[in-house]
Structure formats: structure tokens, C-alpha cells
Amino acid sequence: MPLATAYPPLDVQQPHPLPDVQTIQLPDGRIITGYAIVPTKAPEPVRERPAINPLAVNIALGGIGFAAACGGLMLLTTFIAAVAALIQELIILAAVIFGGFIATQVLGNNHGAQGGTIVNIRRAVFKRNHFHG
């Protein structure tokens, strides 16, 4: 297979068509022939970006700072709530331990070497609204 048929032919184009040839006669009689020079346009001036308003920058930075502070305050309030719950649990634990200690002192077997609690039961007699023990 020939190489020319495998690929389409390249379409070569000149970047700019050649201008017409011009002839100019100078005042002293000389004749100058050449191409006309087309004046080129100056490139568009680059538009300078407008300066950012400092108030807008301050508002944006304030918003970022506010968001950071809110996150920190949320963590702080969570920490305070956790510490309060811990203190409450410690108070309840102390009350249970102290209450158990008091209960063992009151109801314990500390009445001598008899090994039991002594309870005296008497029969009370009421005669004519008068107590006889």
C-alpha cells in the first residue's frame, strides 16, 4: 500500500496572504517598488483587575474566625458537660460508699462478744389508761 493513500494529503495554508506590490515615486524622481506595510494593531491593553475591597476581605476573615470559634465553643461545652457528669457520678459513688459504711456501723455486730443483737421485748399492760411496764 503506498504511503500517499494511507494518509490524507496535508492542506498547507499561508498564515497571511501576500499584500499587493505598490510603487511610489519620490519628489526627486526616484521610484520605489515594494510591498505595502500594513500597520499592525497594538495589542489590547491588559485590563487590570480591580483591587479587592478590604471590607470584603475583613468580612470573609471574620466569617472564617466565627466558624472556627463556634466549633471550639461546641467542643468546650461538650467538655464541660462531660466533666459535670463525671463529678455527679463521683458524688453518687461517694454517697453510696458513705451510706454503706454508716449502715454497717449501725447494723453491724459491734455489741460485744455475744455474737448477736440483743432485743428486749416486754409485755406492756394498760390498765385504766395507765401504762404498767
Image (spheres, rainbow, N blue to C red):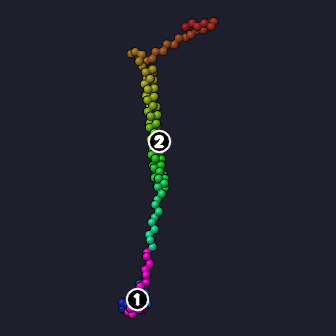
Disc number placed over residue 77 in the picture, else none: 2
Q: Nearer the viewer, residue 28 or 132?
A: 28
Q: Amino acid at mark 2?
A: Thr
The answer to whether marks 1 and 2 mark residues whose Cβ atoms lie closer than 8 Å is no
At which x and y percent is residue 55? Answer: 48, 54
Other residues around mark 2 within 10 Å, as few (<14) / some (14–19) / many (≥20)? few
Measured as percent of width and height from the top left, residue 97 is found at: 43, 28
Residue lying at 45% horizontally and 73% vertically, measured from the top left? 44
Q: Amino acid at mark 1?
A: Tyr
Tell me: residue 25, above or below residue 53: below
- Mark-to-mark CA distance, 1 and 2: 84 Å
The answer to whether residue 38 is left or right of residue 127 is left
Residue 113, given in percent of the width and then of the height, sits at: 39, 15
Instruction: Looking at this view, name the residue that lies furthest to the right.
Output: 128
Q: Is residue 124 magenta?
A: no
Residue bounds of the magenta highlight: 21-43
Helix, strand or loop status at disc 2: helix
Q: Nearer the viewer, residue 66 or 51?
A: 51
Q: What secondary structure is found at the residue carrying circle 1?
A: strand
Residue 100 placement: quadrant = top left
At 47% across and 49% down in the image, what residue appears? 66
Q: Quadrant of the N terminus?
A: bottom left
- Which residue occupies 45% across, 26% down? 99
Q: Work out which quarter of the rendered image holds the C terminus and state it.
A: top right
Residue 39 on the magenta span:
yes
Residue corresponding to mark 1: 35
Q: Tell me what residue is drawn at x 53 percent, y 11 percent.
A: 122
Answer with mark 1 or mark 2, whichever residue precedes in sequence.
Answer: 1
